[in-house]
Every structure is written in C-alpha cells, then in structure tokens.
Image: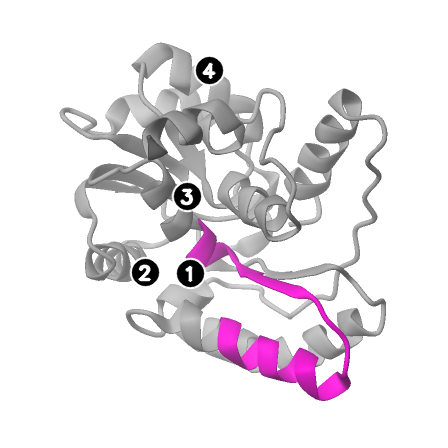
Amino acid sequence: METEVPEMLRRRESIIPDERFTFHSARMRLAKVTPEELRAMNAETGRCATELIDARVDALSTACLVAIMAQGPGYHRKVERELTELIDEVGTSSEVVTSAGALVNGLRGLDAKRISILTPYMKPLTAQVVDYLEAEGFEVRDALSLEIPDNLEVGRRDAMLLVEDVRRLDTQGVDAIVLSACVQLPSLQAVPIVENETGLPVVTAATCTVRDILSSLGLAPEVPDAGVALRTADHVEKAR
C-alpha cells in the first residue's frame, strides 16, 4: 500500500498537473501470512482507521485482501459498513474502499466472468481467495500460489518475476488475469508487459484499489502504464 499506490497517484499527477494527493498510512502488525495472524491484524482495523480519520482524509482504504477474504464470502461489505459507521461516529466524511471489494468491482467493471489468479499465499489461503471470488460469481480457471509465508519477503520480491510466473498459469479462455491478488506483492511494473504478451486484461489488487479510490472521489480512473483497471476508455466501452 505504501509503495505502488503512491506511485500510481504520482503517475496520475504527471498527466493531470492540477491534481495533488497526499498519502497517509497506519500499520497493522503482520509477520507471517497465516490465518491466525490475519485475524489478529483485522482486529486492529478500528485503531488504524481512527488514526487516519484524524487527518481528515478524503478516502480511507484497507490494504490486505486476504485478511478480509479469509473471513468468508462477502466479508468486505461488513468491513466497509463498519468503517463507514466509525467515520460517521467521529462526525467527518471519508469514502471507504477495501482492496477485496475493489478487486471484485474491477473485475465486474470489465465484465469478466472467467479469470485466472496469481497469489503469494500458501495454497490453503489461495483456496479461500478462490472460494471468495467464486462466491462473487466469478469462475476461477486456475490459481497459482507462490507460497511465500513471510510478509516481508512478499514485499521484497521483484515485480518482473511475475512475467515468468504468469506463463505457468492456465489462461486459456479467461476474460482477465489477476496478476497479483495481494497489495503487498509488487506487480505494477509487470502489468503492461503481461497485458502485451497475453493480449488479455490484467488487473491487480493494487490497481483496482486505486481505481476505486479515484472513482469514489469523482475522478476519472486514469493512470499511465497501470493496466486496464486504470484506462478509463476500456471500462467505458465495456459499459456500453
């Protein structure tokens, strides 16, 4: 969240000079990506949100997709509702986005029905992500788990390795590729390359999160070299 999201906002400023963004973050602890640590991390959501609300942010987003999806189908709606209620209690206003909900929204915006996904998670957690997406109405043709349990190692991985990884993913007959179902896994640099090589729409948890942030603020979701989720024309054409 602290690397690729600000990078996309900077890229947007390069094409729309009148816009300026500030980025604020509050951290939840996570060392190993396990069900137990993900549940403990979720318990810190309220604290982090309260800290950020004090900055009077215009949009508030949770980063960890699997922490939400591991709690069962539709859980992002519960988190979004609770965060909205918390904001209302404080008496301010912020748009609420979750990376889990943003990925669902981004795929629906492309009218994608069949997808293949790549995750850094261990296979049991990837299976929960697959179940979550299928409960949202998507058919997951294939899911590749990189099986990296250490959260820091996930964040340090070279994004360009995904260009090779995706070649092990079955993408036959899919409508879109989820190149990274994790905001922590670097992927932005690889997105346009994989789109060019496969000829398929490519999204990530991070690109979809930025798309929802911009849309929630009434801004056109346009960012250079960030893939289909942030090319307005692709979504406009799909909606016709």
Q: CA distance from mark 2 to mark 3?
A: 21 Å
Q: Amino acid at mark 3?
A: Gly
178 left or right of 1 in image: left
Q: Amino acid at mark 2?
A: Leu
Relative to the observer, which residue lies in front, 223 or 239? 239
Part of the protein shown in magenta: 80-102
Q: Is residue 107 above or below residue 28?
A: above
The disc, 4 or 3, on the residue closer to the chain's N-terminal end is 3
The disc, 4 or 1, on the residue closer to the chain's N-terminal end is 1
Q: Quadrant of the C terminus?
A: top left
Dot in front, 2 or 3? 3
Are there few (<14), some (14-19), or many (20+) residues within 10 Å of tag 1? many
Dot in front, 2 or 1? 1
Q: Amino acid at mark 1?
A: Val
Name the residue that disc number 4 marks.
Answer: 193
Name the residue that disc number 1 marks.
Answer: 66
